[in-house]
Image: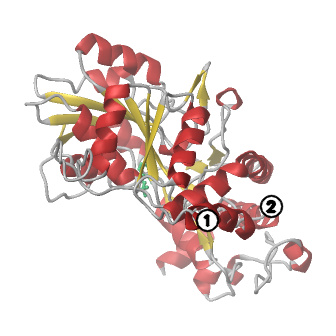
Amino acid sequence: MTAVPTVDTGAHATGNSLGRATTRSVDDLAAFGGVPLFSTPRSASNLVQPPADTVLGYCDVSLAAHRYTNNGPLVQELEARLARFHETRHCVAVANAFWGLVLAMRALALPGRAEIVLPSLTYRRMGDVAWWAGLIPRFCDVDPATLAPSAATMAACINDDTALLLAVHPIVNCCEVEPIEQLAQTSGLPLLVDGVESCYERLRSRKVGGFGNAEVFSLHASKLINGFEGGYVTTSNDDLAGRLRLMRGFGFNGPDNVEMLGFNSKLNEIHAAMALACLDGLDEQVAANRRRYLTYVDALHTIPGADLLRFDEAQQPSYKNIVVELGAPWPLSRDDTLRILHAEGILARAYYSPALHQRPTSYPARWGDLPVTEQLTGRYMLLPSGARVTTDDIVVIGALLDLLARSGERISRRLAS
Ligand SMILES: *Cc1c(COP(=O)(O)O)cnc(C)c1O
């Protein structure tokens, strides 16, 4: 019988929890009535928290200036630092990536055309974003090597009604954006990039942030840079940056002068303070992510059928997201695997599943054959990672997956009965 260490994850469940490990078997699984491995669930959300003193130190700046929002000093400092970080001329901070994407889509879409080409295997709400921008999503397939759209999969979706291309980085490694930039150029289409999950990365000599006409990023608490909520758009196009700034603040250009149709998606000073404090500790965070990732590599490399997606070190990864591909001889369905993990307090998630074209929407959406997406969407799961997960937790998670790999048939039978 395979044994899995159990940890007491009470109030202070970090550090030496493995020291309190006891053995565990199929009968002890929480799905079958046993005590969960983690009493405090471990999630795949980053939830990195900078030191309170650092956050409050930044807040003092805007409080002393009596500036709370409307492009205050901290938002300006954040934009300057992020523009340097991404090696672009401009960074325009916004309330979240969702509205940053809507803004950028509205600013970039060719007038008089209806469709935006975007992958189906991507962020769950991306079709909604397109619709809020007044565009009809046309879903493209992905390249199985990158899990991202390629120039070929996007080119297959371009027609006379295409207004815009949206390339999205997957959550491990990067989308190959350069051939898509060439496609955009030869087809005369604007290209927007969702760089949310690759904000730290580099593609050969170029930093993510500088691709396409503009790129969009998130400062949500679950992402690499935590601003509680927030987002930003990077571009090196002066005119585009100017329009985005107008649009995010009601379209105002000077008092009572509404220059264009805008909405309110400004970032406020408190969010900027949190994001700045987080930027201060970014390299340390990535080093800690790398330690967690290497612990996963070590814990999973002997488990048949559970293949960890490896980061491409050449892309300067943030090592934040841990994705596992389940395939033969893994003995359980992904859904059953998730059921068992959830019962243990391991909040693993299905990776981009179902794909966007497989979900009902309240708006029109279009697509052709998406064979790769349909094949891949059932295979991957996202494991707990980020600032709240310790390397001991990862050893425990690895031991549980090892038990599942060895005892899958027994577990399946018990789940069925
Ligand atoms: C989280 C996420 C978004 C949305 O970010 P918000 O700031 O929460 O609106 C967009 N795209 C991708 C790829 C994401 O992962």
- Residue 132 in picture, x, y percent from top left: 20, 52
Mark 2 crowdedness (10 Å alpha carbons): few <14, some 14-19, many ≥20? many
Q: Gap between marks 2 and 1, in whole Å?
A: 33 Å
- Examine the rendering and report whether any part of residue 119 can be seen: no
Instruction: Assess whether mark 1 and mark 2 are in contact (beta carbons under 8 angstroms).
Output: no
Image mark for residue 25: none
- Residue 263 in picture, x, y percent from top left: 24, 54
Amino acid at circle 2? Thr
Identify which residue is drawn at 51% across, 52% down. 75
Q: Image height check: is 372 above or below 153?
A: below
SS of the residue under disc 1: helix
Give the residue pinned by disc 1: 59
Horizontal arrangement in the rendering, residue 248 relative to residue 314 (left or right) = left
Earlier residue among tags 2 and 1:
1
Question: In the figure, residue 264 lies in which quadrant?
Answer: bottom left
Give the residue pinned by disc 2: 391
